[in-house]
Image: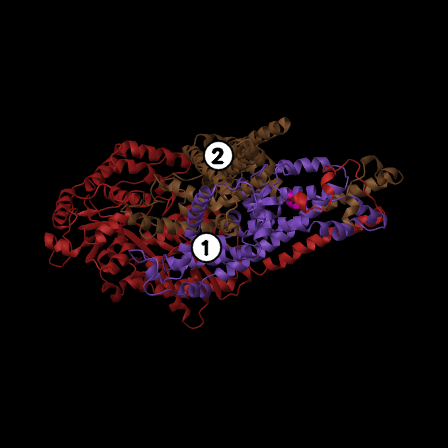
Amino acid sequence: MTTADGLAAPPRGVRPADHLSVGRSRRRRADNLRGWLYCAPFLLAFGLFLIWPTFYGLWMSFTGTSLAGTNTQFVGLDNWTEALGDPQVWSSLVNTAWFTLLSTIPLVLVAMFLAVLVNIGLPGQWFWRLSFFMPFLLASTVVSQFWNWMYNPQLGLINTFLGWFGITGPAWLQDPNTAMIAVVITTVWWTIGFNFLLYLAALQNIPDQLYEAASLDGAGGWRKFLSITLPQLAPTTVLVLVLQMLASLKVFDQIYQMTGGGPGGTTRPVLLYIYEVGFTGYRLGYASAISYIFFFMIIIVSIAYMVIASRRSVKA
Amino acid sequence: MMHDSSPAGTRGSRSAPPDGRPARDPGGGTFLGRRALMQGAGALGALGAVGALSSCAGSSARAADDIAFWHLLSGPDGVTMGEMLDGYMATDGAASVTQTVLAWGAPYYTKLAMASAGGRAPDLAVMHAARVPGYAPGGLLDEWDLDLLGEFGIRQEDFPELIWEKMVVDGKLTAIALDSHPFVLYYNTEIAEAAGVLGDDGLILPTDNPEDFRALALELGGKAPSGYGLSFGYLGDGSNQWRMFSTYYTQLGGTIELPVGGKMVYQEELVVETAEWILSLIDGEVGNPGHDGGTAISEFATGGSGAFYGGVWESGNYKSQGVPFDMTMVPGVFGEPAAYADSHAFVLPHQMSPDPERRRNVHAVVAELLKNSISWAAAGHIPAYSPVVEDPAYAELVPQSHYADAVDHLVYDPPAWFSGSGSDFHTYFGNDMQNVWARRVDPLTGWNDFVARINALLLKPTPM
Amino acid sequence: MSAANPTTVTLTPVVPRAAVTARTASSKRRRGPAPARIAAFVILAVLATAWLVPVLWAVLTSFKTEAEAAAMPVTIVPDGGFTVAAYVKVLSEGLVPRWAWNSFITSAAVTLITVTISALAGYALSRLRFAGRTMLITLIVASIMIPGQILIVPLFHLMLNLNMVDTYWGIILPQVVAAPMVFILKKFFDQIPFELEEAALMDGASRFRILRSIVLPLSKPILGAVSIFVFIGAWNNFLWPFIVVNDSNLMTLPTGLQTVISAYGIQYAQNMAQAVLAALPLIIVFMFFQRQIIKGIATTGIAGT
């Protein structure tokens, strides 16, 4: 049985099984059972750990459930009205959006820039990939520890470096003016490798002929970039943009680890507020309501992407 | 790339599965059921293999003389606790205690609550006593056995009354206090001497009214390199703002109640008076108007200012910095002195099925630590266990013995599920009152913002 | 939350081709004029160095004594030379080896279970025509929209009720639900020509046997890619293990490093030594399997990040 046998799939109509009308219903029955059995282990986990919590969380948002398991009574829309009127919910949503904006832009543009540079084909490919991609493999805690140390006001490398030029650097993570920027820089450093890879792959898939033709027309490097590379990268850019937005909206790790949401709540994203309300403040029900408000935001972004993507594929 | 890695030639075929994909059934339906079942069982078997691993890790699997102990004491406190535990473990028949240190404040309390809710909590933990009343009713803490403690020589009468009250919640002995750590006044003895405000006994002159106290602070400031008599750090530190406020508000006779379902009870005119008094201490003349905790500490530690408001736990830091200092209760300028305080207390986080033998060992550990808490006093805390404080050895500790009478004037947080050290109550107080201290809003505006948030919390059913 | 937090992206259209491998682009077209190439090289070199500095600085610190790590002014190379004292201390006294073991066990279990149940389900959805199949596919695809992070509250509550808080099981199980992986595998199986199985079916082989001896061997690349992605995700996952584990003996490397502090205050060299130790396993694996990892992440990452 070599793979050459599979060179061309037979047309649908002549599939042997379709001729075997005898025993078809028995086969169907068996397949019914087998299909569900094969899916059963996954479905069990899927149902228990994804679907059930999704609906159970919604239910919890209508109760006063606490961490200690008391107060499970129904409270109607109380949690929801409280959440919508809670200034900290709004400020954490604003922080989340702000972080998403600040991080997504460089994570798309810088990733593209790096990929274009690496794709020129300079020597040292292995080294470039290692440098830009490796941080992506690190756990958030490791990244945060590295950068907390970089940002240390007195002992950190950044302020030491600035000091060589006579600049007194700020207390990056403790200063409300710089804390968010500092977290964003760390995030770009940490996760750019992934977008970089996607861009690199997309660049390598651009047919050489396009560039050759452009060269014949006398187009320069910059002109080729604008008229060939950028348009060819457009689908990847849409994908990277949306993936990045969805990932940035869900930020928790590095902010919890680096600033704890501070100073004064200026970097606290909504997931951190959910954590604080639910686990630090024992109010699981209220935390659930905030979770769902956030969920709707994510769904809106997702749907927006799907609309864009489907419009694109219709055009294509 | 998925496409490339698939077997050769498939690229050309349709990727969508055609309807009516043949599915042959050579073995017949009856066999298949069994086969499929076995396949499923195989997958479950893989799960089971992992399951075997998980059973060996729960707390109940440990030996009775292996005690898991959580606390939030780091720095000098952590060192002292480690030494005290080493001391205990060196005794005959001692259990082995493994300490886990988590970051102070919310991270610690969050983890402790989650562990207790999960029923696999550590055997022993430290909590702030003021947090216990809000925490215990949810069933997250187990009760101490006073009889068992008695066997190890620990009795109710060994604790000061104000502290014992904090140890009992709803009639149950829930916490065993190790210490009380009040908010006190530190003063630089060299500056004080130069300013001529030391008495014959070498202690700072007593003051019992606001005018005298201010005059004294100005005297100190006159001799202090920074020009400030007092250091108080408050920026970004809700807890420290609350300690200061609570101290003077209580001196003025103010009280606060936090009835669940009701509204916060307080005396408005006393609130304003307290706030204005504090503002007069950080007016740029007596004290720096814009310090955070760290700068205030370093101002005093480097000998820059005459006096410093802070918790007793800073004393270890100042000792190692070599600044000449003494400590006293915050003088009662409005009447009786008051010392805002909290206590480190031992609690038994809830376990679903505690091992009686291990529980017994835990009681023994705590008894031993209490009896040796003279070492704990080295870090500045006042031991809660009276026999230690009454011992002549304690009277020789300086400056510890100079503020030991604070135990008769302790003021804890008003009980509520959201109050206590490092709680939301402190955070909210800091968020709203910081604007008052920074002179952005008038005292009553800031206070009313704070009260509104607390009232919103009170309207919620207590989650515990 | 890696495998537990799928996103909405559909899997077929934009999956990058194998191009992201070590196949160098050196033979490629856009060889600009030499000055431009030199400029590009310099920019890249500067950026790559900047990218490596935080890691190098951490490594450097980890080989200093505590006193030198905290010395002012900051020195790059300590006067007293380098020392491994911080590593010795961390490895002998801390819980790092224990956490590494926990990370390994739980990540391996997550990978094993995820790949097993996803392959079974993916095969069924690809090959078996059973009632409800279309509905299942729709459900699984739709579920990709649910961000796992918002489920921490109900999931924790569920774990309380299942008595799985502070157990390995509690860490592992919620991470094995990886709808995108099911979908990726289904798509892959769809592309394996059916004729290969047909003959075996004719010969009387069971479905399971076919899956095991024909389909899975042909799927090694994709299984490898999925495994790598799931393993790395589980190894680095922070939020869920952080929520479900409180017992320091059961923590994974990322959660332990974050949660447990030294009783003796902040110790910079030891902190960095811990972080470097925690980073090391994946970096070493990456050095050896750069191609496969890059491939695996590019293939599956789109669906799984």
Q: Is residue A25 left or right of residue A237?
A: right
Q: Residue furthest bottom?
A: B92
Q: Is residue B328 left or right of residue B14?
A: left
Q: Residue at x 42, y 43 (%)?
A: A185
Q: Chain of mark 1?
A: C
Q: Is residue C248 visible?
A: yes
Which structural element holds mark 1?
A: helix
Q: Which of the image's four quarters has the N terminus of chain B?
A: top right
In front of the other: B318 or B133? B318
Q: Which residues are magenta?
A: A42-46
Query: Callout 2: residue from which chain?
Result: A
Q: Which residue is mark 2?
A: A222
Colour seen for chain B: red
Tell me where residue C107 sits by quadrant: bottom right
Badge 1, how many Cα within 10 Å: few under 14, some, many 20+?
many
Q: CA distance from mark 2 to mark 1?
A: 47 Å
The answer to whether mark 2 and mark 1 are in CB contact below 8 A is: no
Residue C257 circle label: 1
Coordinates of residue C128 in the picture (x, y in percent): 77, 42
Amino acid at dot 2: Trp
Can you say whether B434 is above or below B70 in the image?
above
Label 2 Cα neighbours within 10 Å, binned few <14 / some 14-19 / many ≥20: few
**Colour representing chain A:** brown
Is disc 2 placed on a helix, strand or loop? helix
Which residue is located at x 71 percent, y 41 percent? B11
**Colour-to-chain, purple:** C
Left or right? Give the position of B330 relative to C147: left
